[in-house]
Amino acid sequence: MRAFLYLIAPILAALPVSVRGETEWRDDRVHAPVPLYTFDWEDIWPRSIVDPEPGTLFGCESRVAFGDWRFVPAWARNEDDGEWLRWGNYGVIHCAGNVWRADTRDALGTGEYSRGFFVRLGEGRAQGKLFELWALQEGFVPGSSYTLLARAAADGDGLVNRFDVLQRRCPSGKERKASGFDSWLTRYCAVETRADLLALARKMLREPFLGELVLVKEKGPEAEASDPSNSD
């Protein structure tokens, strides 16, 4: 039986290409012009609770635990390597996740902010094992960006508290960038369909993992959070 985190009323930045030792790690920004996954997709979280008795219950449920998560890169040499992600609840009526990112845990409250969802894309095989393929979908307008994730299918259907982070190596012909713009970064990897994103995730599953994303401390349900981007 699946385990969920229920919220009832009475959400990793793109990194440049880096070379560590013998490995070239790719973490291209993967972006779609409109969000690829909406509530018509069964495995998108958080999502509204299905009320067994209409009018008696409302709220949001999530398969991915809310709390502070730490991204530990594959090349980490000490406990300060990596970055932090805080995954919180937006509210109990309009379901969505709040995502904060920062280099240190102490800075999460004022870190980079977005709103998004964890999405189970499908499955793939690598290293003789079956994996669930996931993505963190962030943003609504103009479109959404994606962090590719995986977890061993053998880990079961319980509340998710760990992911392997996949590399993001843009397929040929999908790169978009502007020229003549000095050193300012404009390059990103364009995906326009769910099938394209799943195919990329399956391909990246066969490459060395970029690192792991691990829940450090689970938090309890949150009240509705304001959107920092709307503040004066």
Image (spheres, helix red, strand yellow):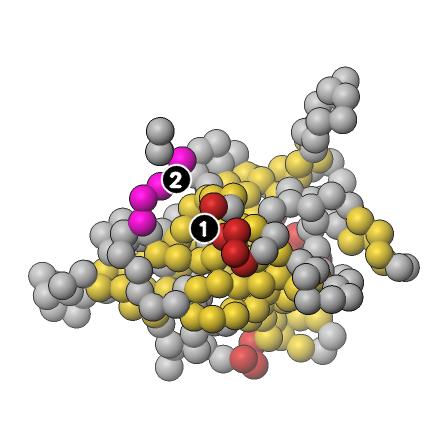
| Foreground disc of the pair 1, 2 | 1
Question: Could you say whether the residue bearing mark 2 is in a helix, strand or loop?
Answer: helix
Residue 228: give its label. Answer: 2
Residue 57 lies left or right of residue 95; in this view the side is: left
Most foreground residue, 153 or 75: 75
Amino acid type at image mark 2: Pro
- Per the picture, the main secondary structure of the magenta-coloured stretch is loop
Question: Which quadrant of the figure has residue 47?
Answer: bottom left
The quarter of the rendered structure image containing the N terminus is bottom left
Does residue 123 appear in this view?
Answer: no
Q: Residue at 70% of width from left, 31% of height from top?
A: 185
**Mark nearer the N terminus (1 vs 2):** 1
Q: Name the outermost residue toward the left.
A: 55
Evaluate whether residue 112 shows in this view. yes
Q: Residue at x 78, y 63 (%)?
A: 75
Whole-percent x, y for residue 2 in the image: 38, 77
Q: Where's residue 23, x and y in %?
A: 85, 58
Residue 82 drawn at (x, y percent): 66, 58
What is the total number of numbered labels drawn onto the structure image?
A: 2
Label number found at residue 109:
1
Looking at the rendering, the stretch of residues picked out in magenta corresponds to: 225-229
Element class at badge 1: helix
Q: Residue flagged by tag 1: what amino acid is it? A: Gly
Q: Nearer the viewer, residue 229 or 168?
A: 229
**Badge 2 local density, few (<14 within 10 Å), some, or many (20+)?**
few
Residue shown at the point (42%, 46%) measured from the top left: 115
